[in-house]
Amino acid sequence: MEQNVIIVDSHQGPYLEEPDIERGVLSPEARPILHRVNSAEELIGLVDDAAAIISWHTIPLPASVIARLKNCRGIVRSAAGYDNIDIDYAAQRGIPVAVVPDYGIEEVADHTMALLLALVRKLHVVGPRAKNGEWDWRAVGRVPRLRGLCLGLVGFGRIGSAVARRAQAFGLQVAFYDPYLPSGVEKVHAVTRHETLHDLLDWSQIVSVHVPLTAETRHLIGRAELARLTPETILINTARGDVIDQQALIESLAAGHVGQVGLDVLSGEPHVPDALRTSERVLLTPHSAFYADASLAEVRYKAAATVRRLLSGQPERNIVNGVAPRPRP
């Protein structure tokens, strides 16, 4: 009997036009069905009979939706993060939640470096001015030499370590803070390890955030952390918007306590606060760090392949809520 796999996407900024990749992976055992909605409430009645769900990040999957799933064998988040899914309640229901942690690593690392280079070289300042006829190199103001600058990475997983390799090629000094990694990682990557976040921030001229959004990391970069930065510090976030206390960041910018900011993610995106939108010291991109033609195809294929394993009861290494796949009936 063919099983329905529901793909949950959004009307605003949809990721899929047609579930063709998913169909190629899942057929003939399962049929992917794409639903675009604006809210979790609209999912009621659409996902109740799903054998599995593929979730894109713009629509949450709260307990109220998960409670209605009758025979769901797994939820797969089409990304590395899973902050839009109530994974604890899914565990109570015996539903494994898996992610795709190894897609788009190159793209996010490259995007981080693109933001870093643009901010150091102040391309976001001089580019628009040059187009307006201000052909004067002095308009860029003071620019440090890239080689030798101190880059502090908050989080040193797949993406953080990929950023480190790229930054080292440019001659930056690289350090990280990540309390979950075993001793010796710093030796493998030829970087410096800081034992506290505040020590890393005190050392860094550039800070780049690479941690998932969890209860522990929400507002990890808050007022106390921003106060340790300087008017010359560059702060970059390609992780999740709420890892940084956005209001505290706006206040720090206004007070001149942080130099320049590169943000691919925001709290409450796609809304952009005026203070960030109008500041010449802020470079914004629209949550596009993950994207390349190849990375979008990769995450779609891998999410569907994970669903296929969950439906067949095969082992799955990327489950984040500790629930093992159920054997095939």
Image: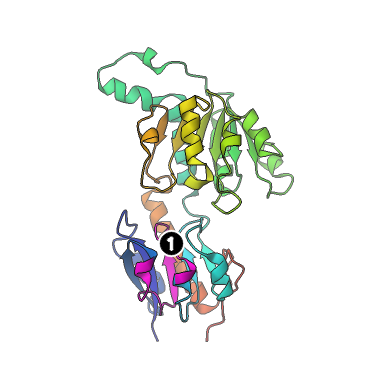
Please give the residue where the numbered disc 1 appears in the rendered image: 60
Identify which residue is drawn at 45% across, 77% down. 69
Q: Residue at x 59, y 23 (%)?
A: 148
List x then y, in percent, for residue 158.
57, 49
Mark 1 lies on a secondary structure that is loop
Q: Quadrant of residue 322?
A: bottom right
User: How would you classify the magenta stretch by its main secondary structure?
Assistant: loop
Q: Is residue 240 visible?
A: no
Q: Is residue 53 within the magenta segment?
A: yes
Left or right of 205 on screen, residue 187: right
- Depth order, front residue of 164/72: 72
Q: Amino acid at mark 1?
A: Pro
- Outermost residue to the right: 183
Magenta stretch: includes residue 114: no
Residue 25 higher or lower than 226, as above or below: below
Above or below residue 247? Residue 103 is below
Q: Is 260 drawn above or below residue 141 in the view shown?
A: below
In the rendered structure, which segment of residues is drawn in magenta?
41-64
Q: Quadrant of the N terminus?
A: bottom left
